Amino acid sequence: MGELIENSGLPMLLIDSNRIIVVNAQAREAIGAHVLGQDARIALRHPAAIDLLTRDEGGSANVQGLTGPRSNWQLTLQRIDSRYSLVELINRTAEADVSRAHTDFVANASHELRTPLASIIGYMETLQDAGDDLPREKADKFHGTVLREARRLQNLINDLMSLSRVEAEKHDQPRELVDLGLLVRQAARDGAGSERVDRVSMKVPDEKLQVRGDPKQLEQLVRNLVDNALKYGAEDKPVKVKLTPGNSDMCVLTIADKGEGIAAEHLPYLTRRFYRTDPGRSRAGGGTGLGLAIVKHIVERHRGRLDIKSTLGEGTTVTVRLPSISAN
């Protein structure tokens, strides 16, 4: 029986009464070879697993924390006879993580949508109830707030749709040839807009640097990064946009600002959906909390690499490395 299950694709344990007498290769890798010879109730050490082992008819049970705090396993017990039993283990951790991420995303998105909607409804109800009795100056202020919150809602919905599209296409590598230098120049200007373009310092080579990519997504990547740098960098300091051919057939795009910088503890989480280091400041600036999440997925779709470095009081530098055409 041990020889039969040794090379199974799933972790399996053979139990004699309550003692584990066979641990196949997958099970040794998952829970360790040390369980061989142990009482199964001690080795699996979980109330749901212990309950499963006592069932005369066998069955299945979900066990959390078997191989780590966040692990999730499905255990299936099959009775061979009155003495021997076979336990099959299926790792459900990834499925649980996806489900939890989906639940968190829906909850966060609902919260982000609810906030501007509540503001719009509140101000519009006040305008409707007050009618002509409301002073013109205050009415104009309320109308301005409603318009600002409506635009914030529109930006949030646009970013949610963009993120959804990028995630749906992440396994589909783009094949279109793109002149990255030309794209960076135009997208950086678009991201800055006419009011802030003077703050952008660009250093892009004259020679053509080609990549295989999705032009719209690459434009969005550059716009998002330039907008972030201008938004959070010092207003009297330039935002530097630089494109260079890197080593190992890579194009390197760096966007650096001189601002307050970001504390080290925040850096690993910056590309999470709706993550903000300063929620009040981000919302006041019109941020949705999705810009860097979109950038991360665009970079991954283009088989590139994203690095973010920051020093408090000095500023932040974002580096994007994309495979050049010669690498394909």
Image (cartoon, helix red, strand yellow):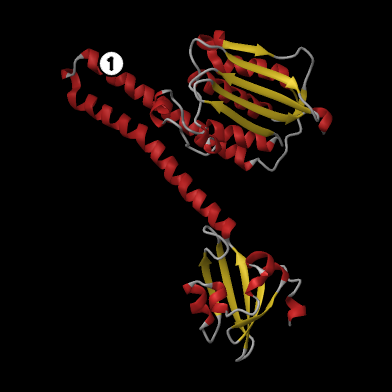
- Tell me: residue 60, above or below residue 278: below
Amino acid at dot 1: Asp
- Tell me: residue 43, above or below residue 221: below
Q: Residue 206: x, y in percent?
A: 76, 12
In the image shown, does 266 or 196 lie closer to the viewer? Answer: 266
- Tell me: residue 53, above or below residue 142: below
Q: Residue 15: x, y in percent?
A: 63, 82
Describe the element under mark 1 as helix, strand or loop: helix
Image point (41%, 28%), residue name: 283
* Quadrant in which residue 115 is drawn: top left
Q: Residue 216: x, y in percent?
A: 64, 27
Image point (70%, 19%), residue name: 243
- In the picture, the quarter occupied by the N terminus is bottom right
Q: Which residue is mark 1?
A: 140
- In the picture, the quarter occupied by the C terminus is top right
Q: Is residue 11 visible?
A: no
In the image shown, does 74 or 40 lie closer to the viewer? Answer: 40
In the image shown, does 255 or 154 lie closer to the viewer? Answer: 255
Residue furthest left in the image: 133
Tell me the crowding category of disc 1: few under 14, some 14 to 19, or many 20 or more residues within 10 angstroms, Cα based: few
Q: Is residue 105 left or right of residue 220?
A: left
